Amino acid sequence: MNVLVTGGAGYIGSFVSHRLIERGHHVIVYDNFSTGRKEFLHPKCKFVLGDVRDRELPARVMKDNKVDIVMHFAAKTSVTEANTQPLDYFENNTFGTMNILQNMVKSGVKKFIFSSTAAVYGDTRKDFVDEMDILSPINPYGESKASSEKMIHYVAEIHGLSSVILRYFNVAGASLDNQLGQKNPVANHLFHFLTETALGRQKNLHIYGNDYPTVDGTGVRDFIHVEDIAHAHILAAEKLMVEDHYRHVFNCGYGHGYSVLEALHMMENVAGRSIPYEIIPRRPGDPAKVLARSEKIKKELNWHPQFDDLEIICKTALDWKAKTTSS
């Protein structure tokens, strides 16, 4: 396959790019380095410096490289930031997706994989969510992705697009060989702060609320190792290449979760030291619990997670962070 990977120098996009190349596919990474890193580029990829909001460049890249399929990762992803900068999120995430789709139509590319999120479900008050649940996002980040999903649906119907939408739950961890991981300078997720605190780079971990209706009052999340997310993309791409008019939405999670405090205690075990923390008020837009029903992706794509282990997630995240700077 000739695969265009937008945001391919970022966290998840770089994993997918590397794994695609390892399987013999040709990868064109399209990234503006707003959060991506040059060192994450595979030496065999073709790199194009560009923004997903560019009105002309993506189509030229698709045509020049005879692109078969587009994997669209490029997006802003911080719920906290989205709550203060909603227009930036709609411009980058929703308009950016619209622009990529328009460029696909111009260039005749018919296969699309979209990086979505469990945030589209909102605060469901359910133990598990499945792909048929109503989308009710409660923050601008989730709304920007839900709007993109709706757009993909209509474009697929009208222009004959084959598409797979992957709704990530809480992606964490790094590669087992310590070569790839999260290095976003504005990362705003639990494992970034857990590892920074475990390594003594910040004073304590802020825990946003301990009065949720959960096992210990802290939020519960379905943490999934980034390698398992990457493999889901490979399977989706290879499925799209052999089937036309294929349109599916899949949850990407393990179907069980851990609270913030449970994740903290596991990180303490892995690090061999205590991690100081402070309980502060809840953040707006944070649901109490979000867990995936993932039977559909297992059945449809034959996806079998290999790293469903909180200790592995913590160890790979900590090993990676220990070799990097605090960014």
Image (tube, grey):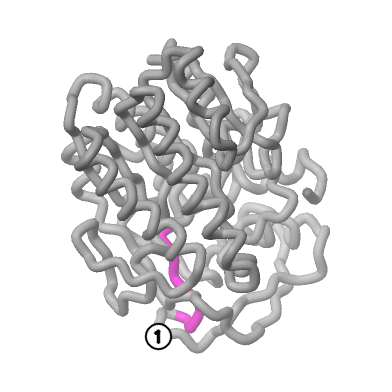
Figure quadrant of the N terminus: top left
The reply, left or right, for residue 146 in relation to residue 198 is left
Q: Relative to 233, is 62 above or below? A: above
Q: Residue at x 50, y 13 (%)?
A: 64
Q: Residue at x 32, y 46 (%)?
A: 152
As helix, strand or loop, the secondary structure at mark 1 comes to loop
- Quadrant of residue 119 within the rendered picture: bottom left
- Of residues 219 and 286, which is closer to you in this image? 286
Magenta region: 216-222
Q: Is residue 274 in sight in this rendering?
A: yes
Q: Relative to 65, is 178 above or below? A: below
- Of residues 167 and 324, which is closer to you in this image? 167
- Determine the main secondary structure of the stretch shown in magenta: loop
Number of marks drawn: 1
- Quadrant of residue 131 within the rendered picture: bottom left
Q: Position of residue 242 (x, y in %)?
A: 21, 20
Q: Position of residue 145 (x, y in %)?
A: 42, 56
- Of residues 174 and 3, which is closer to you in this image? 3
The reply, left or right, for residue 11 in relation to residue 130 is right
Q: Amino acid at mark 1?
A: Pro
Q: Which residue is under mark 1?
A: 213
Mark 1, other Cα within 10 Å: few <14 / some 14–19 / many ≥20? few
Q: Position of residue 17 (x, y in %)?
A: 52, 26
Q: Residue at x 59, y 12 (%)?
A: 44
The reply, left or right, for residue 86 in relation to residue 228 is right
In the image, is residue 282 part of the stretch drawn in magenta? Answer: no
Q: Position of residue 153 (x, y in %)?
A: 26, 48
Q: Is residue 311 in sight in this rendering?
A: no
- Quadrant of residue 245 within the rendered picture: top left
Q: Relative to 93, is 111 above or below? A: above
